Amino acid sequence: MELEIDENVHGSWTVLLIRGELDLVTSPRVRRRVHEVVARGRHDLVVDLSGVRFCDSSGVGVLIASRRLLRSCGGRLRLILPEPGTPDEAYPHVGRVLAALGVRRLFEVYGDVPEALTDGDADAVEAGGEDLPGAGPAAPGRPAVPRPRT
């Protein structure tokens, strides 16, 4: 299956909607696209993986590398992985792979794009997000944002 990547901008956030298979052949395209977004000065990224039907270790590697890149420039990465059993969850594979490899905890995970876009830093501060375990270091000038789901 061919990999499709659509890009949308919502305020400070860039959303990449990925559909298809994220594997050894297609993961370099995702890596390039993330680098292009960052090169344009867009450092807050939502990657919607709800349309990905297969992901192998090279796909997971791209997600981890993207997280590292965005954190290095003071940015944020949020993943869209719908909850198991929800109507939006057409392909639960990616969430299972991340969990099986023990890396899902590295990412801020949301059920859909609107949820990821509306979870602001002010909410995290009001909820005491700075002190939550696993919230990770904050970008300079920004409070830490806890991962909403694990």
Image (spheres, rainbow, N blue to C red):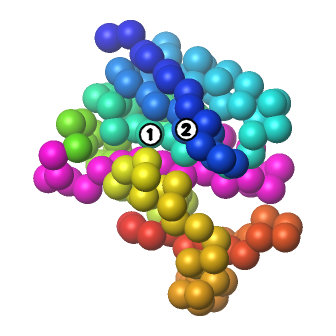
- Relative depth, front residue between 31 and 121: 121
Q: Nearer the viewer, mark 1 or mark 2?
A: 2
Determine if the magenta segment contains residue 74. yes
**Residue occupying image coordinates x 81% and y 30%:** 40
User: What separation in Å lies between label 1 and label 2 (alpha carbons)?
Assistant: 7 Å
Q: Which residue is mark 1?
A: 48
Q: Position of residue 147 (x, y in %)?
A: 50, 69
Query: Which disc, if any, is residue 71?
Result: none
Figure check: 100 above or below 128: above
Point out residue 101 in the picture as x, y percentages from the top left corner.
41, 51
Give x and y (percent) for residue 20.
Answer: 35, 21
**Residue 124 relative to residue 6: left or right:** right
Is residue 24 in view from this perspective? no
Residue at point 24%, 36% (across, down) = 91
Dot 1 surroundings within 10 Å: few (below 14), some, or many (20 or more)?
A: many
Q: Earlier in the sequence, mark 1 or mark 2?
A: 2
The label number, if any, that marks residue 15 in the structure image: 2
User: Do the numbered discs 1 and 2 sit on residues whose CB atoms are within 8 Å?
Assistant: yes
- Indicate the amino acid at tag 2: Val
Q: Which residues are magenta?
A: 63-87
Q: Residue furthest top?
A: 2
Q: How many marks?
A: 2
